[in-house]
Image (cartoon, rainbow, N blue to C red):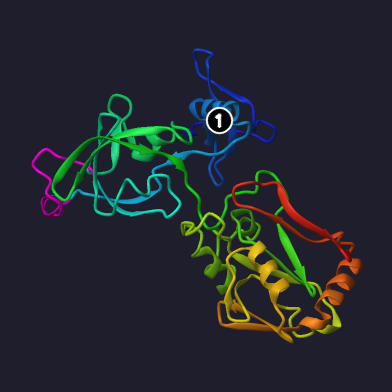
Amino acid sequence: GVIILAINSGNSGGPVVNEDRKIVGVAFQGLEGAENIGYVVPVTVVQHFLEDIQRHGRYTGFCTFGISYYMLENASFRRSLGMKDGMSGVRIGSVDPTAASLNILQKNDVILEIDGISLGNDGKVPYRPGERVAMNCYLHTKFDGDFVSVKLLRDGEIFENVRVPVSIQRRLVPAHFQNQPPPYVVVAGLVFTVLSIPYLYAYDAWADYVSDKICYLLNHVDKPLEKSTDQMIVLTQVLAHPKNLGYDKLQDLHLKKINGKDVKSLQHFRQLLSDCQDEYIRLELAPDDYCIVLERASMDQITKEVCEEHFISKDYVLRSNADSSAIDCTVNGS
């Protein structure tokens, strides 16, 4: 939440107390460009975080239905969906392929109520007297695996008490790696990693224009996972070697194909490299249809030499989307 209160250096992480000397949140940061205005993590969020750890042994996140939805403030639109006078709710636009609600909610369903609470045409529910919050704010109070009782309108028919599971919304671009270093693969001096929010924050990508390539990567941030193992692989830099001459300026490029085969994840990329028997390895990258060609026979030796020169002990570390622990790695030259 936003409060009228100065948060100075060193205050972050401290308690915020109201006039009754009750803790209402944790000081987070000041609002850049403003005086005496700061951000506070509300106590309800802190409590949810602590209970999440107690339930699961680690922080998992905040839950949603895993849907996109649209407001129904237009009366003609409501009538076209079979909504009668006095009905209100939101129309489902899509359901994420990996959402727990996938086989229950459908496109064009109208959500009328959640847990007996009427949903407004603006997608909000009552919160405190005179206040309303978005539906997702209510769903954020739930935990992975919990169920919400939903009243639905589907093809003109009302369905009462539909049990809909909530789950952590998984995006193609992960928000973090559970405080672990990012995964990577070094191939002949080319360093590939998984596109993530921290990767883009390192460029301050949301603050200003950086490059066409970063804009291209930003356009994938809100895309849902098609499969739980999917990752978006990025060429982050090239460690110079005589054999990769001409590629050393390339960076921030989306790896799409290897020898004509789609690359689905970093682990899949490693597997495709291992299985390849062609004389040349052709990597296709976006945007602008960049192409890199490597000789398979010399690739492993180049990787070994680059890793030794730059004191890189492991030429790859892989992590799954579901688990932040390393699932595979190899020591340079082994």
In the image, farthest residue toward the left = 85
Q: Which residue is rendered at x = 32% and y = 25% of the image?
A: 128
Query: Is 77 left, or right, of 290 in this rendering?
Result: left
Q: Which residue is rendered at x = 61% and y = 63% of the image?
A: 265
Q: Nearer the viewer, residue 123 or 150?
A: 150
Q: Which contiguous range is marked in magenta?
A: 74-89
Say which amino acid is labelled 1: Asp
Quadrant location, the C terminus = bottom right
Q: Residue 233 lies in what quarter of the image? A: bottom right
Q: Position of residue 228 (x, y in %)?
A: 53, 54
Residue 265, above or below 164: below
Q: Position of residue 330 (x, y in %)?
A: 81, 59
Q: Residue 162 lies in what quarter of the image? A: top left
Query: Is 206 left, or right, of 198 in this rendering?
Result: left
Query: Is 286 left, or right, of 128 in this rendering?
Result: right
Q: Which residue is rendered at x = 41% and y = 39% of the image?
A: 166
Residue 166, above or below 271: above
Query: Is 272 left, or right, of 144 in this rendering?
Result: right
Q: Nearer the viewer, residue 314 or 18?
A: 314
Report whether residue 211 is seen: no
Residue 152, above or below 18: below
Quickly name the residue at label 1. 52
Magenta-span inclusion, residue 88: yes
Report whether residue 69 is seen: yes
SS category of the residue bearing label 1: helix
Magenta-span inclusion, residue 76: yes
Q: Position of residue 301 (x, y in %)?
A: 87, 76
Q: Position of residue 292 (x, y in %)?
A: 68, 82
* Secondary structure, magenta segment, majority class: loop
| Crowdedness near tag 1: few (<14), some (14–19) or many (≥20) residues, C-alpha within 10 Å | some
Q: Residue 52 lies in what quarter of the image? A: top right
In this rendering, the count of numbered labels is: 1
